Amino acid sequence: MNKVLFFAHIRDAVGQESLQLEAAGKTVAQLKAEIAEKYKLEKMETVMTAINEEFAMNEEIIQKDDVVAFIPPVSGG
Amino acid sequence: MENAINERYSRQVLFPGIGKEGQEKISRKHVLLIGAGALGSGNAEVLARAGVGKITIIDRDYVELSNLQRQQLYTEEDVAEKLPKAAAAKKRLLAINSDMNIEAIIGDATPEVLEERVAGVDVIIDATDNFETRMAINDISQKYNIPWIYGACVGSFGMSFSIIPEKTPCLNCLLRTIPLQGMTCDTGGIISPAVQMVIAHQTAEALKMLAEDWEALRTSFVSFDLWRNQYTSMKMSKAKFAGCLSCGENRTYPYLDQENMTKTSVLCGRDTVQIRPSSTGEISLEKLSAQLSVLGHTVKGNPYLLSVEMGKERMVIFKDGRALIHGTKDLIHAKSIYQRILG
């Protein structure tokens, strides 16, 4: 299983801070697409992803027990 | 005079990370601050009090009542006088520290303006409200080899990352494209503590750079939510993208090219400005409509567009991000309204 953490408006859309999901073997892009569809989030391409607290590209494959975090870049200032 | 200066900065000089040498370095440095809103005010005040030699501030807006909740340099008097933020900031900063040199530029931070102002700058601090300007800052930073410090916040959420050319990944490595609908303070709201936390992260990094304590820099990307009690620090060692057009081998600095910038034009014979964003994709009109309604704007719409009353102006936003701002012929003002809503 994988722990998946959500921040900012993604957390609001999912309704909780984290979920336990089976994501091993999927790419970051695949997991993003699934979450975007399930929670009606548009455009997750530019959402940053951390795997085990390290920046991960969209092509990276998620491993068993990896902790994944989705962090949307925000623009307010 | 010498004594007064020694006393003024004595507590900062006592701090081992800075010391007498660090303070002297700080006093000779020049910071370019892009934006004088919430992050801009706070960054400017910290740096002015810390004794930075020169700050150049670029901002295109004037002070409004809704700014006072978090933009710490401004007063009700500035609102009544509708002072440009850059000018109001300069006035307040010189009252705090009359020894320093402040250059206030009232205008849009376009790539041309940035290129004109970058000579002799040691650090660029991002206090803008949109990704287009940040991508231009990012390209300028790479082209002229000047570090810059990204900072942004919305709601109770904030983030910061320091970008050092040739050492760290750049913003274009991380995003690859301009996000079309970044949450902004005008759509998601903002609380002052989130602003202050981003300012603390940005100015701590800036002081390290200005005092030349490069070893002390935080190399991770930090983000936090002060209401949800979340805090995360993301290591960036694998984030550099070899094919990056801003910092890779075959770089072109795409965001210094007008072709990739938001296009604004006054519509002929009408009191209207058209805005075409540089990013492509669809925005969720439904979500935007809900956010703007919560803020008290009158919003009307259909599946193709939204019409929003915003004080004197009315903005019509289409699904592809294009917008018409009715009630103005001022291109910079119109772009400012647009980016406040769409980031």
Image: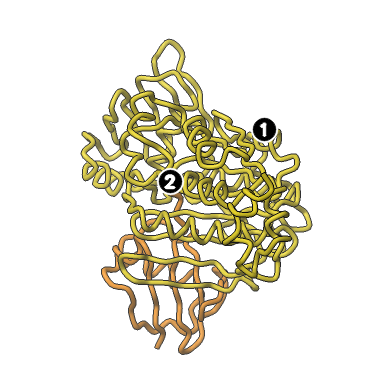
Chain colours: A orange, B yellow
Q: CA distance from mark 1 to mark 2?
A: 24 Å
Q: Is residue B120 above or below residue B103?
A: below
Judged from the image, the secondary structure of the residue bearing numbered disc 2 is helix
Quadrant of res B170: bottom right
Q: Position of residue B42 (x, y in %)?
A: 47, 49
* Disc 2 residue type (three-letter): Ala
Residue B112: assigned label: 1
- Left/right placement of residue B177 relative to residue B334 reads right
Q: Is residue B259 above or below residue B148?
A: above
Residue furthest top in the image: B269
Q: Position of residue B41 (x, y in %)?
A: 47, 44
Quadrant of res B213: bottom right
Judged from the image, the secondary structure of the residue bearing numbered disc 1 is helix
Disc 1 residue crowd, few under 14, some 14–19, many 20+, Cα 10 Å? few
Residue at the spot 54% in from the left edge and 43% down from the top edge = B132
Residue at the spot 53% in from the left edge and 34% down from the top edge = B90
Q: Position of residue A76 (x, y in %)?
A: 43, 49
